[in-house]
């Protein structure tokens, strides 16, 4: 299985300042050299969660150091809401897109959540986009209604493997139709494997003992040959 790093540089884990970004880049180099590390055009891919926390000089150091290690550079993807190419972001993506973020505790349809992701699927030759597929969003397990000033989110409790599967196939079809807007490797990201407290997960659970979400993923990624 291929892997890549997604750097959650937020909420007390920020990487602040050029020197810290340089240190981080140096620390990541051995991972980038791993034979199973995911690459884009032979460049190791790294995703930055909070793009506003990036550092232009730090990213330049990252590219230079990668070349010293024998790599052609690094593919640096940032969340599309704030990842300019001039900062050093070569690609765009999302971790997730939450339309009802802190808009109040309201029940909404999972399809609304799906549509919000798909509306963001757009890139360019200069900054290809890695589409994000979302398995759900329901943050109520983490929210405490007893806390004063707590800002709640919409929740989407009606998710199903079938709608998730259609969402996956839409991502595959979008990449097929827009090769000039995405990576030639046709990479997508899924939110998420095990965000249980946020309602976005595809790992088998008591509610999904047969792994139906994983079966939908396999079906979308490896279509059944036509006879």
Image: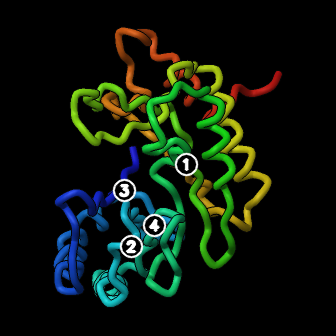
Name the residue that disc number 3 marks.
4
Q: Secondary structure at mark 2?
A: helix
Labels 2 and 1 touching (C-beta < 8 A): no
Q: Is residue 58 visible?
A: yes
Whole-angstrom CA distance, mark 4 to mark 3, is 14 Å
Please state the horizontal and vertical placement of residue 59, each as a whole percent of the image: 35, 82
Q: Is residue 90 left or right of residue 151?
A: right
Q: Quadrant of residue 124?
A: bottom right
Whole-angstrom CA distance, mark 4 to mark 2, is 9 Å
Labels 4 and 2 touching (C-beta < 8 A): no
In the rendered image, the vertical position of residue 192 relative to residue 87, given as above or below: above
Please state the horizontal and vertical placement of residue 172, each as a whole percent of the image: 68, 44
Please state the horizontal and vertical placement of residue 28, each as a whole percent of the image: 23, 68
Whole-angstrom CA distance, mark 4 to mark 1, is 12 Å
Name the residue that disc number 2 marks.
52
Q: Secondary structure at mark 4?
A: strand
Counting residues from the N terminus, which is met first, the one under dot 4 or under dot 3? 3
In the rendered image, the vertical position of residue 29 relative to residue 72, given as above or below: above
Which residue reaches farthest front?
148
Q: Is residue 150 left or right of residue 157?
A: left
Name the residue that disc number 4 marks.
78
- Mark 4 or 3: in front is 4
- Mark 4 or 2: in front is 2
Q: Is residue 42 left or right of residue 143?
A: right
Which color scheme is applied?
rainbow
Crowding at dot 4, Cα within 10 Å, few <14 / some 14-19 / many 20+, comes out as: many
Labels 2 and 3 touching (C-beta < 8 A): no
Counting residues from the N terminus, which is met first, the one under dot 3 or under dot 1? 3
Q: Is residue 219 visible?
A: no
């Amino acid at each position: 299985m291929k892997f890549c790093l997604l750097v959650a540089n937020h909420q007390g884990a920020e990487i602040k300042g050029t020197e810290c970004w340089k240190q981080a880049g140096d620390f990541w180099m051995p991972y980038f050299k791993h034979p199973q590390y995911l690459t884009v055009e032979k460049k190791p891919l790294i995703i930055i969660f909070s793009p506003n926390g990036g550092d232009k000089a730090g990213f330049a150091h990252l590219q230079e150091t990668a070349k010293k290690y024998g790599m052609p550079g690094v593919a640096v993807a940032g969340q599309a809401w704030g990842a300019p190419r001039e900062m050093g972001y070569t690609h765009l993506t999302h971790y997730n897109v939450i339309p009802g973020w802190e808009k109040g505790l309201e029940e909404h349809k999972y399809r609304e959540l799906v549509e919000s992701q798909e509306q963001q699927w757009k890139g360019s030759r200069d900054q290809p986009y890695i589409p994000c597929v979302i398995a759900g969003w329901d943050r109520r397990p983490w929210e405490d209604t007893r806390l004063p000033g707590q800002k709640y989110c919409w929740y989407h409790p009606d998710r199903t493997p079938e709608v998730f599967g259609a969402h996956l196939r839409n991502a595959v079809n979008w990449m097929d139709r827009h090769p000039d807007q995405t990576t030639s490797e046709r990479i997508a990201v899924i939110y998420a494997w095990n965000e249980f407290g946020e309602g976005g997960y595809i790992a088998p659970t008591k509610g999904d003992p047969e792994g139906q979400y994983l079966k939908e993923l396999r079906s979308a990624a490896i279509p059944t040959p036509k006879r």
